Image (cartoon, helix red, strand yellow):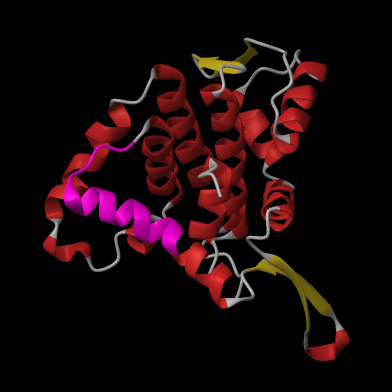
């Protein structure tokens, strides 16, 4: 399966054994929203500058979810604030990305019964092959960083969103022996193209605001 940015972020952000988010759901949603916008930036469909999002190319992407997001951005082009779009897209980003993963056989829909008779629907790896692939999402990035290999632009953006949303320790678990990796992360993010770097910064700000509001 191709390494699609939002799909990889979803697999990193969710427990492969339980399907539950490793983060507060608001943070996960914002990270996924940013990943979906990043996919459009990487395809040259949208750009970001000074906190504003703008359409570069309205030609539909091949991916159905990216197509839907671009159509929405185009239909509401009067709204350009990046953080507003992150907040809006975050509302159902987890579901939309999970459905895309399900279409390619990476996860399955699992319904579990809770106490008092209610049910919970999760999208999670449900076979050994699926669980191995899900675990590989973070292991792959970790291995590249440990070996000092170059990351492609999509993976550098993935690392940026991992850092921005607080997932670093889940990817870098046990990396106490590799402090140089932690020290290199800020410069890696700073080296991103301007629009992607702004997306990382806006995501980090949005996560901080969302979690602060949630604590009130």
The stretch in magenta equals 136-151
Q: Main secondary structure of the magenta part?
A: helix
**Can residue 53 be spotted in the picture?**
yes
Residue 108 in which image quadrant = bottom right
Residue 148 included in the magenta stretch of the image: yes
**Above or below for 111 versus 134:** below
Left or right? Give the position of 202 relative to 57.
left
Q: Which residue is farthest right?
A: 117
Q: How many marks?
A: 0
Q: Position of residue 63 (x, y in %)?
A: 70, 34
Q: Residue at 68%, 60% (x, y): give it.
A: 105
Quarter of the image with the C terminus in it: bottom right
Estimate the x, y position of residue 214 in percent, counting from the top left: 60, 56
State whether residue 162 is above or below residue 18. Answer: above
22 lies left or right of 163? right
Who's the residue at 69% across and 25% down the image? Answer: 61
> Image point 21% across, 49% down: which residue?
182
């Amino acid at each position: 399966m191709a390494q699609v940015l939002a799909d990889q972020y979803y697999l990193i952000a969710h427990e492969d054994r339980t399907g539950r988010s490793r983060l507060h759901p608001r943070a996960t949603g914002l990270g996924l929203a940013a990943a979906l916008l990043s996919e459009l930036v990487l395809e040259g469909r949208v750009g970001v500058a000074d906190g504003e999002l703008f359409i570069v190319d309205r030609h539909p992407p091949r991916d159905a979810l990216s197509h839907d997001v671009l159509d929405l951005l185009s239909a509401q082009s009067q709204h350009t604030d990046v953080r507003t779009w992150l907040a809006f897209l975050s509302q159902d980003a987890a579901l939309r990305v999970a459905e895309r993963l399900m279409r390619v056989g990476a996860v399955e829909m699992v319904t579990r019964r809770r106490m008092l008779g209610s049910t919970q629907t999760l999208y999670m790896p449900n076979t050994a092959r699926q669980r191995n692939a899900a675990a590989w999402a973070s292991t792959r990035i970790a291995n590249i960083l440990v070996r000092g290999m170059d990351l492609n632009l999509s993976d550098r953006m993935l690392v940026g969103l991992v850092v921005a949303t607080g997932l670093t320790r889940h990817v870098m678990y046990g990396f106490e022996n590799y402090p140089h990796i932690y020290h290199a992360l800020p410069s890696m993010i700073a080296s991103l193209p301007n629009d992607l770097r702004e997306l990382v910064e806006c995501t980090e700000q949005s996560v901080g605001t969302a979690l602060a509001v949630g604590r009130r």
